[in-house]
Image (spheres, rainbow, N blue to C red):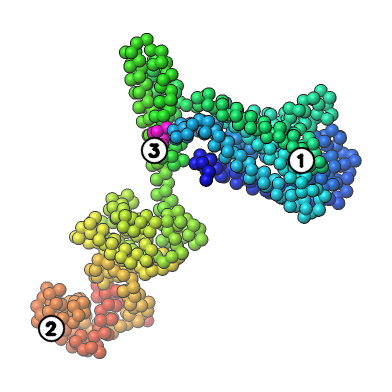
């Protein structure tokens, strides 16, 4: 198992490593594959016999592109391959030590139970691991294609050239690592590595043609990489050992130099030193820098305990050597300097935590906005279903399963940031788990998306609404049917909303309305002309009753709601049983339908439901012709 810092380093560098890996793969694959189409090109022979001066052809590695060895040397191993390997290694090597200092987060790393030398060693190990991956790419692809395309290069010689290319990259990476450890500056590490690489290449390229440069070839890493022509002669273990040994020496230099040097980016050391020496507290610009440190830590998800521990550890590290404390003339002077230093430490820690909290608030706001946008697209059926399913996974929702949508309303509309929504969500998350619940407000409604396997969820939602809103808040819940996929969530949401609309029209008072129990009403409304005719023919004559049709329709509705019990219907209508009986007689006389007759009851009940859906007799029936 890899050490934790090696794992974290590989995780931090994963995007850069993947990007460079793809680039190296594409480069070696494309350029090596071109041999099949250019090996018989006469222009390559002309380039060999004429064209560029001999010295320039040697410098560029294109002396002979007519053979497989010459082509592989010129296209992969002479210039572009080393350039890509050096760039990738230098960037990662510079980031390894100097990167955290440039981002002002070195104290967060050193706050962990790890020595400074172990820190460098583990970062170097991660760097070597990434470069080994790059080395495998530039070895395997040319090795396989050279045999497939019959380039006339032995597998051993390709392996020798690839081993040299890997060690050249390793040398560049460890050079950037050592310079970064010594200076704490990423730019300096990249500049030194770049200058060294260019100088080494020029010495190698011109060493054979310029006499005064020729003796310097021994200091060029390119001489040890390709000076023995590995594609022709195979391994030169002495040269490869020089590259490997130089890389090991540079890692040792990085270990020693970093161990002897305090990080140069540490704003805290200078602030505390000034406070101990003069008593001056941190200025606004210094506190702003501390806030930025906290904000950077929050953006990367550093735990707050680690952040505080790192800050205090940095103060503890510099405490003993602070001016005014280490060289205090008396104990009272040392105490005064210590008080001033601790006050500055307190203020800087406050600034760091302020930045951290601001970063967390921004992250929460961004997540909330993303969540709101996702729910809008999900509930209203916007966007590509595949993309919706991918976005849903961020919020723990697997849209491939079946879900139900519960829609709640109250007398007071629900709004964004409503404490009631937060309390209900917290209760449901505690009951069913964070990955099973999505709660939000839409159109003044509380919307809850739940997996259909949580069968008690609507009742649980009702229970918590009672706890949050009370029993007198006039709330109701409409529950859609279980549906699959993003489109199913949208349909279940529509069914939940329609259940609440039907409750308004039909006067349903149940606290939880299931769309599955109300399927007959959409059927009635589907043929609007037929339901209008039914109401007009069956109930239309009630308009001639004394007081109009409304009391008669109300009486029929109360009777049907009471399962035909006239006493219960009278109680609902706040009238006497005799009055209910009189009205039922009048209904039979006017319409010809008796509510007490089983064969006629269904017709009357369907007509009453239609009247309630059409808001008749309050609203005149439209003409269907």
Question: Does the image show residue 422?
Answer: yes
Q: Which residue is found at the position 28% from the left and 52% from the top?
A: 423
Tell me which residue sits at (40%, 53%) in the image. Answer: 372
Magenta span: predominant SS is helix
Does 40 sit above or below residue 521? above
In which quadrant of the rendered image does the C terminus lie?
A: bottom left
Tell me the magenta residue range: 305-310
Residue found at x 68% / y 37%? 167
Q: Mark on residue 304?
A: 3
Q: Could you tell which of marks 1 and 2 lies nearer the N-terminus?
A: 1
Q: Is residue 419 left or right of residue 558?
A: right
Q: Is residue 307 magenta?
A: yes
User: Disc number at residue 235?
Assistant: 1
Residue 3 % position (x, y): 51, 41
Please indicate whether residue 289 sits to the left or right of residue 124 in the image. left
Q: Are marks 1 and 2 in contact (CB under 8 Å)?
A: no
Tell whether label 2 touches label 3 (CB within 8 Å).
Answer: no
């Amino acid at each position: 198992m890899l050490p934790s810092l090696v794992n974290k380093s590989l995780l931090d560098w994963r995007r850069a490593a993947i990007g460079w890996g793809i680039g190296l793969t594409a480069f070696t694959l494309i350029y090596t594959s071109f041999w099949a189409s250019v090996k018989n090109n006469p222009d390559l022979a002309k380039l060999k016999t004429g064209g560029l001066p001999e010295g320039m052809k040697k410098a560029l590695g294109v002396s002979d592109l007519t053979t497989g060895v010459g082509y592989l040397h010129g296209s992969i191993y002479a210039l572009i391959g080393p350039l890509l390997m050096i760039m990738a290694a230098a960037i990662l090597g510079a980031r390894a030590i100097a990167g955290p200092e440039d981002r002002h987060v070195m104290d967060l790393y050193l706050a962990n139970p790890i020595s400074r030398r172990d820190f460098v060693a583990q970062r170097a190990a991660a760097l070597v691991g990434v470069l080994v991956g790059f080395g495998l790419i530039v070895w395997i692809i040319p090795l396989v294609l050279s045999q497939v395309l019959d380039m006339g290069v032995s597998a051993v010689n390709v392996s020798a050239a690839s081993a040299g290319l890997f060690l050249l990259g390793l040398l560049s990476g460890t050079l950037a690592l050592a310079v970064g450890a010594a200076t704490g500056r990423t730019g300096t590490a990249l500049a030194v590595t770049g200058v060294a690489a260019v100088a080494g290449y020029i010495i190698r390229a011109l060493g054979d043609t310029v006499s005064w440069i020729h003796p310097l070839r021994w200091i060029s890493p390119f001489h040890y990489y390709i000076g023995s022509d590995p594609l022709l002669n195979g391994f030169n273990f002495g040269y490869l050992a020089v590259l490997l040994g130089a890389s090991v020496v540079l890692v040792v230099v990085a270990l020693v130099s970093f161990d002897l040097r305090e990080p140069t980016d540490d704003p805290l050391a200078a602030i505390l030193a000034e406070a101990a020496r003069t008593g001056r507290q941190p200025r606004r610009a210094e506190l702003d820098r501390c806030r930025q440190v906290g904000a950077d830590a929050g953006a990367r998800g550093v735990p707050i305990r680690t952040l505080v521990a790192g800050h205090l550890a940095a103060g503890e590290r510099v405490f003993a050597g602070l001016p005014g404390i280490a060289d205090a003339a008396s104990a009272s002077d040392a105490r005064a300097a210590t008080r001033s230093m601790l006050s500055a430490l307190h203020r800087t820690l406050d600034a760091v935590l302020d930045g951290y909290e601001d970063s967390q608030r921004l992250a929460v706001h961004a997540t909330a906005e993303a969540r709101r946008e996702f729910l809008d697209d999900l509930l209203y059926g916007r966007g590509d279903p595949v993309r919706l399913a991918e976005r849903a996974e961020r919020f723990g929702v697997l849209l491939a399963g079946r879900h139900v949508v519960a829609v709640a309303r109250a007398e007071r509309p629900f709004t964004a940031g409503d404490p009631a929504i937060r309390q209900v969500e917290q209760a449901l998350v505690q009951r069913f788990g964070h990955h099973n619940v999505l709660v939000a407000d839409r159109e003044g409604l509380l919307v809850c998306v739940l997996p259909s396997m949580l069968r008690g969820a609507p009742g649980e939602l009702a229970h918590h609404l009672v706890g949050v809103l009370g029993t007198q808040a006039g709330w109701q819940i409409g529950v859609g049917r279980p549906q699959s996929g993003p489109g199913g969530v949208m349909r279940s949401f529509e069914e939940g909303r329609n259940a609440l609309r039907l409750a308004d029209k039909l006067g349903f008072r149940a606290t939880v309305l299931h769309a599955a129990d109300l399927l007959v009403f959409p059927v009635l409304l589907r043929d609007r002309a037929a339901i209008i005719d039914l109401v007009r023919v069956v109930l239309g004559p009630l308009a001639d009753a004394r007081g109009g049709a409304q009391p008669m329709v109300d009486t029929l509705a109360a009777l049907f709601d009471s399962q035909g019990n006239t006493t219960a219907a009278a109680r609902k209508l706040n009238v006497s049983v005799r009055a209910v009986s009189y009205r039922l007689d009048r209904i039979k006389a006017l319409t010809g339908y008796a509510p007490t007759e089983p064969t006629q009851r269904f017709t009357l009940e369907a007509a009453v439901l239609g009247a309630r859906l059409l808001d008749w007799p309050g609203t005149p029936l439209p003409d269907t012709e």
